[in-house]
Image (tube, rainbow, N blue to C red):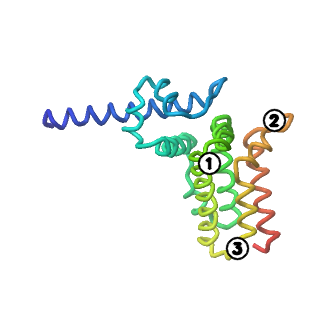
Amino acid sequence: MSPREYRSDKRQAAAEDTRLRILASARSLLAGAKPTQISVDAIAKAADVSRQTVYNVFGSKSGLLEALFDSLATRAGIDPSQAFLAPDVDTALRRFSEGFCRFWASDQVVIRRLRGMAVLDSDLDRLLRERDDMRRSALSALLRHRGQETAADTIDVIWQLTGFETYDGLARRDPARDPAEVADLVATAVTAVYRAAGG
């Protein structure tokens, strides 16, 4: 390896370390006892980098938030392909439902705060709506993959059942439910709705 390649590798490693530190700081701010609005300044300060560094790494606040969502999904181990590999549609829907429940459970406080902050932050609101639309598209693709023609209303109901608000509401009941119990409740409801609609 030439000295130039070695220096390039070190720069890439340092850049990735900075990227991960910024994302970890954003998550820590959201998970903290006194969360603040997500601002580039607050995240930069927490990560001990300049505001310009955040923009250099992510391009924009929206780019930072997109990367944060991706890192939360990676941290949760989301793997939608498992639903597509299921032997039948009931198992596929169960895997799809349980997968998203695991995601919501993995960083429940952070996700709840992000969704709450979206009420006052149009960029964040847009990004969360896009993510929710991606979940609906994945659900539609999953059912098409199984050769199922499913009414849009049925997909909408299943989409709503697999959303964060449903998970969070069921998990926060008194007494609080175990994440696996909530996932089973959601998956059972999803299958029942699908069957009731003639699936």
User: Which residue is denoted by mark 2 in the rendering?
Assistant: 176
Image position, residue 35 (x, y; %) = 64, 28
Q: Residues within 10 Å of mark 1 (few under 14, many from 20)?
A: some
Quadrant location of residue 158?
A: bottom right
User: Which residue is denoted by mark 3 in the rendering?
Assistant: 150
Q: Residues within 10 Å of mark 3 (few under 14, many from 20)?
A: some
Q: Identity of the amino acid at label 3?
A: Thr
Q: In front: mark 1 or mark 3?
A: 1
Give the tally of numbered discs: 3
Image position, residue 125 (x, y; %) = 62, 48
Q: Are the residues flagged by discs 1 and 3 in contact, CB closer than 8 Å?
A: no
CA gap, disc 1 and disc 3: 28 Å
Which circle's residue, 1 or 3, is located before the other in the chain?
1
Q: Residue at x 80, y 57 (%)?
A: 189
Q: Identity of the amino acid at label 2?
A: Ala
Image position, residue 22 (x, y; %) = 46, 31
Q: Are the residues flagged by discs 3 and 2 in contact, CB closer than 8 Å?
A: no
User: Which residue is denoted by mark 1 in the rendering?
Assistant: 125
Is residue 52 left or right of 180 when viewed as pictured? Answer: left
